[in-house]
């Protein structure tokens, strides 16, 4: 597998180093060429004109010429007439070895500095300290002064070989100078990364390497639990929505553990937050999609692959999370409602036609799937009475779903006065995506035809509900129109693509 660095950055799970090739299609002033992105915490978008310039290093060869790049999942080879440079990542370290010199223009933000110490060149960026340490070769720092703008120019660090060899380590550290042990050289680091990637690939349902790499690039950890981030460079991380969908790409034990990681962030009262920012959990209610991957993972005996102790722990967490909705978002007749528009997961869109609070068909489906997942776990754990209760809740939600089907389409119902209004595609079509849970109609085919107008998540779920439409829907929902031929897909869409491989 080769990575096109114009479309998909080179990086690694748990590392903040990113190497990409800027094409600047919007003409926003970025110089075209190779960049090393340091993913500093103050950035919230990745690459190109959307990103702030600070925290990125422009890479050229020492003569000022351009490198050509050949990237795979484990290493990158930069080539110029002067020679070549090989890069590989090992956790907090980017290892470099080559025969060509390297010129680096460092873009710093306000208050950020670069200086030389005994350890090498240090870039101080808020809580992060980036260290460039030369092991073999020479280094030079050049800083000028802009007399017109009255500020220093971007520092230029130049690394040159000595006796034909250049070796260096780029450290992503903290103000505590915590520098752990790393691989002894670039080749060892590349082999370590390749082994880790293949291990990750082996835990997925599908085997599309590009989709798998996007997921591998985006996985992070928080307090020992694996989480999927909205984008690798961002400090705001979508939790509930993306976690549930991403888990569809994994085999049963991993899917259960991933959902457990999400539910483990819930408040003492059972509210699962929609967002995590840094070390702060923001207690906003999120759409309860957790049962979707669990029902899929448990089907066909998959539940037997989940260790009993993990299953019991997951049951307790999901029981508590569903209990929050029962206590805070249910009506006397048993229907659930969204109290605020954002709870549907479609922020900024007119998802609830009559406003909130509202009973919505997608919420009926999510709660039915949660109840089915809990029923499966209760049966496996020998909790017969609880299993009966969950089965009754699931059936009640499907009956509520059927009551919302009016004149060939779904409606949302006001939780205050019972007024009804037709649902937009974002909510009204979601219940159709799993097939037998809703009345049969031709709306799914039309939705696939209009996929370019729908939310990316909706496009992906359409593909999941109808594998025959997978390629069309995934391409329409991807960040780039040529996603299926190597473009930069979102992590959620990549997870859906891997799940669809297994179904087909």
Image (cartoon, rainbow, N blue to C red):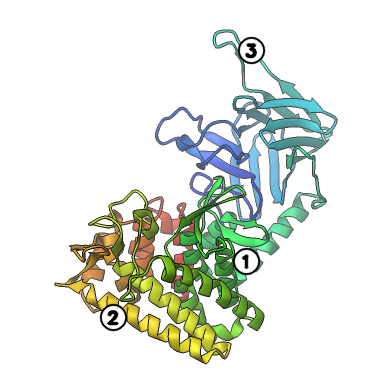
Horizontal side of 326 relative to 187 (left or right) equals left
Give the farthest residue toward the front: 332
Residue 142 image point, x, y percent: 71, 20
Q: Is 362 displayed left or right of 56 in the figure?
A: left
Q: Can the viewer see residue 49 in this picture? A: yes
Q: Is residue 469 visible?
A: no
Chain-order first, disc 3 or disc 1: 3
Residue drawn at x 73%, y 59% as measured from the top left: 192
Q: CA separation, marks 1 and 2? A: 40 Å
Badge 1 element: helix
The disc at residue 145 is 3
Which is closer to the viewer, label 2 or label 3? 2
Q: Is residue 16 above or below residue 254?
A: above
- The residue that disc 1 covers is 200
Q: Which-is-in-front pick, marks 1 and 2?
A: 2
Which sits earlier in the primary sequence, circle 2 or circle 3? 3
Q: Residues within 10 Å of mark 3 (few under 14, many from 20)?
A: few
Please tell me which residue is depicted at 34% across the width and 57% down the height of the picture: 476
From the viewer's side, name the closer residue of 400 and 150.
Answer: 400
Q: Residue at 35% of width from left, 68% of height from top?
A: 363
Q: Secondary structure at mark 2?
A: helix
Residue that carries the numbered disc 2 in the rendered image: 399
Q: Is 149 above or below relative to 57? A: above
Q: Residue 7 at x, y = what percent?
A: 48, 47
* Whole-number angstrom distance, CA of label 2 to CA of label 3: 72 Å
Vertical position of residue 291 compared to residue 195: above or below: below
């Amino acid at each position: 597998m080769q990575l096109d660095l114009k479309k998909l950055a080179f990086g690694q799970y748990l590392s903040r180093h990113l190497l990409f090739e800027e094409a600047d299609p919007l003409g926003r002033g970025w110089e075209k060429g190779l960049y090393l992105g340091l993913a500093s915490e103050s950035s919230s978008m990745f690459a190109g004109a959307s990103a702030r310039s600070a925290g990125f290093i422009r890479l050229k060869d020492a003569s000022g010429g351009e490198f050509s790049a050949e990237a795979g999942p484990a290493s990158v080879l930069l080539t110029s007439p002067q020679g070549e440079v090989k890069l590989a990542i090992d956790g907090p370290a980017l290892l470099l070895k080559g025969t060509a010199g390297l010129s680096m223009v460092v873009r710093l933000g306000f208050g950020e500095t670069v200086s030389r110490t005994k350890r090498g060149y240090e870039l101080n960026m808020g809580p992060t300290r980036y260290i460039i340490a030369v092991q073999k070769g020479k280094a030079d720092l050049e800083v000028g002064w802009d007399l017109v703008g009255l500020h220093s120019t971007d520092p230029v660090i130049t690394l040159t070989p000595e006796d034909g060899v250049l070796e260096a380590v780029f450290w992503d550290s903290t103000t505590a100078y915590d520098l752990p042990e790393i691989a002894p050289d670039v080749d060892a680091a590349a082999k370590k990364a390749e082994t880790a990637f293949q291990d990750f690939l082996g835990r997925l349902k599908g085997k599309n390497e590009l989709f798998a790499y996007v997921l591998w690039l985006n996985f992070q950890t928080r307090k020992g639990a694996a989480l999927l981030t909205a984008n690798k460079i961002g400090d705001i991380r979508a939790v509930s929505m993306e976690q549930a969908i991403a888990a569809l790409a994994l085999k049963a034990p991993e899917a259960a553990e991933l959902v457990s990681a999400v539910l483990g962030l819930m408040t003492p009262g059972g509210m699962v937050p929609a967002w995590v920012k840094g070390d702060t959990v923001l207690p906003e209610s999120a759409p309860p999609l957790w049962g979707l991957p669990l029902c899929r993972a448990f089907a066909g005996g998959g539940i037997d692959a989940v260790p009993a102790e993990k299953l019991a722990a997951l049951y307790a967490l999901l029981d508590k999370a569903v209990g929050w909705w029962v206590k805070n978002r249910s009506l006397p007749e048993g229907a659930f409602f969204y109290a605020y528009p954002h709870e549907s997961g479609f922020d900024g869109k007119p998802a609830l036609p009559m406003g909130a609070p509202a009973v919505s068909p997608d919420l009926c489906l999510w709660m039915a799937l949660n109840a089915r997942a809990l029923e499966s776990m209760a049966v496996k754990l020998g909790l017969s009475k609880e299993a009966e209760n969950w089965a009754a809740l699931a059936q009640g939600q499907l009956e509520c779903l059927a009551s919302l089907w009016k004149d060939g389409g779904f409606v949302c119902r006001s939780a205050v006065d019972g007024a009804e209004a037709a649902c937009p595609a974002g909510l009204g079509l979601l219940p159709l995506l799993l097939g037998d849970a809703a009345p049969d109609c031709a709306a799914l085919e039309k939705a696939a035809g209009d996929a370019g107008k729908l939310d990316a998540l909706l496009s992906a779920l359409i593909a999941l509900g109808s594998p025959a439409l997978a390629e069309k829907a995934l391409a329409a929902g991807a960040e780039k129109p040529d996603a299926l031929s190597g473009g930069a897909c979102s992590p959620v869409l990549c997870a859906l693509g891997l799940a669809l491989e297994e179904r087909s």
